[in-house]
DNA sequence: AGACAATTCGAACATTCGTTTTAAAAAGGC
DNA sequence: GCCTTTTTAAAACGAATGTTCGAATTGTCT
């Protein structure tokens, strides 16, 4: 039996993923965690701070591993630039495979990351602060891999990549009603599919568009 | 002064976009609209029905114009397949330029569409029902444009496109803190940038991936 | 053992929520 | 004119919310 603090975090993460953050009450969290209602405020002070901690616990290691992978690929590449596919992999693989990183939770947080983008503004900004240097590092490496492209192009394409990542993380269940159920596949296949799609998109910039 | 029903819809759309759906109360909507609290239940019956009507009012014309454009491009192509770029344009242009379609509202609903993906499941399913045949029609046309690709590939790439569309619709403000502010550009340039990115991604499928 | 801090518990706080009800007033069509 | 539809006003409903507080409990140290 974990301590109360992590049990709250786990329960909150699960319910946030399933029902959305705004629709999840503190009482449902404490019920899921099997702890007392007041313990949330004892350990976290407020509801908003709990939300922040839930994200912080996961995004920290995820972003750390992003930079780790980027570093690793950089050393493997030596003086030459990291292959574009590898840069993309370093960016999207950690959130896709993050589930077992901290606890034995199901893939709940993977969905939750997808939900991140639609939070109220204040929460958004706080979450974005956890991202800062990751973007900077990846843009720098993308610049080396695609030197002919402008920084503006790279920013836009990275933004597109975040969008693709978000729609994948939010899960298949959402679209299973309207998209085909055959979409289900293992995560490794999804990763390779995303890398190919995004790499092609990145390389498309600079072409003269045929209107 | 519009009638009460559309004033409620406009106010709800604005507040939903700004604060998120779950965080918006009926009382704040009636305050914004300058109407009585009870009028919401008089015209819409319940809160959930109001949410549905807000989306319905916009998604109806948007999806209709998607199919219109697809049809128009189809006739222009005659017997041959519609160019991939045109199929993509028919899919992403209507939501990008939808603002002036119904009312003189600011681009609030554009953001709201981006938020769609993170609603509770029941709302999700109801919203997805407004999408049904659109996906079917576009997959059919994509099949003609990219006959060598499997239907599974097309579904995945379309899903990726929805992700890119979502991240663009959710607005620049979210990322302005961590991404560069130079990202701002007019909507037409954004459209062309997206089309180029997505078309390249679509065409990448089937290539043997270099692991 | 006792003493002290950390933690957990049960209960209650004041607010806000969606919803309903009542009545009256305003608007519009026939 | 009258009759129906719409809008406003005010109040109240039960339920659920985030938060707070003091007492009880547990754990840890000497």
Image: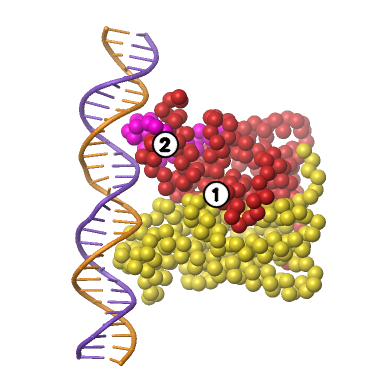
Chain colours: A yellow, B red, C purple, D orange
Q: Is residue A35 left or right of residue B210?
A: left
**Magenta highlight on residue B59:** yes
> Image height check: is A29 above or below A160?
below
Q: Which residue is mark 2?
A: B32
Q: Is residue A139 left or right of residue B15?
A: right
Q: CA distance from mark 2 to mark 1?
A: 33 Å
**Which quadrant would residue B169 be assigned to in this image?**
top right
Can you say which quadrant of the picture contains the N terminus of chain B?
A: top left
Q: Chain of mark 2?
A: B
**Magenta highlight on residue B14:** no
Residue A202 is marked as: none
Residue A151 is at least partly visible in this image: yes
Q: Which structural element holds mark 1? A: loop
For image coordinates 52% across by 43% down, the residue present is: B112
Q: Is residue A13 left or right of residue A198?
A: left
Residue B108 percent location from the top left of the image:
53, 39
For image coordinates 60% across by 39% down, the residue present is: B95
For image coordinates 36% across by 56% down, the residue present is: A25
Q: Nearer the viewer, mark 2 or mark 1?
A: 2
- Between D19 and A12, the one lying in front of the other is D19
Q: Which residue is mark 1?
A: A175
- Between B78 and B34, the one lying in front of the other is B34
Q: Which residues are magenta?
A: B33-62
> Image height check: is D24 above or below A128?
below
Residue B31 percent location from the top left of the image:
38, 36
Q: Chain of mark 1?
A: A
Q: Main secondary structure of the magenta part?
A: helix
Q: Which structural element holds mark 2? A: helix
């Amino acid at each position: 039996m974990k301590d109360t603090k992590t049990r709250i975090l786990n329960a909150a993460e699960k319910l946030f993923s399933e029902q959305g953050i705004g629709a999840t009450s503190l009482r449902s969290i404490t019920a899921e965690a099997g702890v007392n209602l007041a313990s949330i405020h004892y350990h976290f002070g407020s509801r908003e701070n709990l939300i922040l901690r839930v994200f912080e616990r996961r995004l920290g290691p995820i972003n750390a591993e992003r930079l780790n992978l980027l570093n690793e690929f950089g050393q493997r590449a030596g003086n030459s630039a990291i292959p574009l596919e590898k840069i993309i992999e370093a960016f999207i693989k950690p959130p896709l495979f993050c589930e077992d990183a901290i606890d034995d939770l199901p893939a709940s947080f993977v969905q939750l990351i997808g939900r991140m983008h639609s939070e109220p503004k204040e929460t958004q900004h706080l979450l974005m602060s956890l991202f800062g240097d990751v973007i900077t590092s990846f843009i720098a490496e993308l610049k080396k891999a695609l030197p002919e492209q402008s920084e503006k192009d790279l920013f836009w394409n990275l933004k597109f990549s975040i969008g693709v990542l978000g729609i994948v993380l939010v899960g298949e269940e959402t679209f299973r009603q309207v998209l085909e159920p055959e979409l289900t596949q293992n995560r490794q296949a999804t990763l390779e599919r995303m890398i190919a799609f995004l790499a092609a998109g990145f390389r498309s910039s600079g072409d003269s568009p045929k209107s």
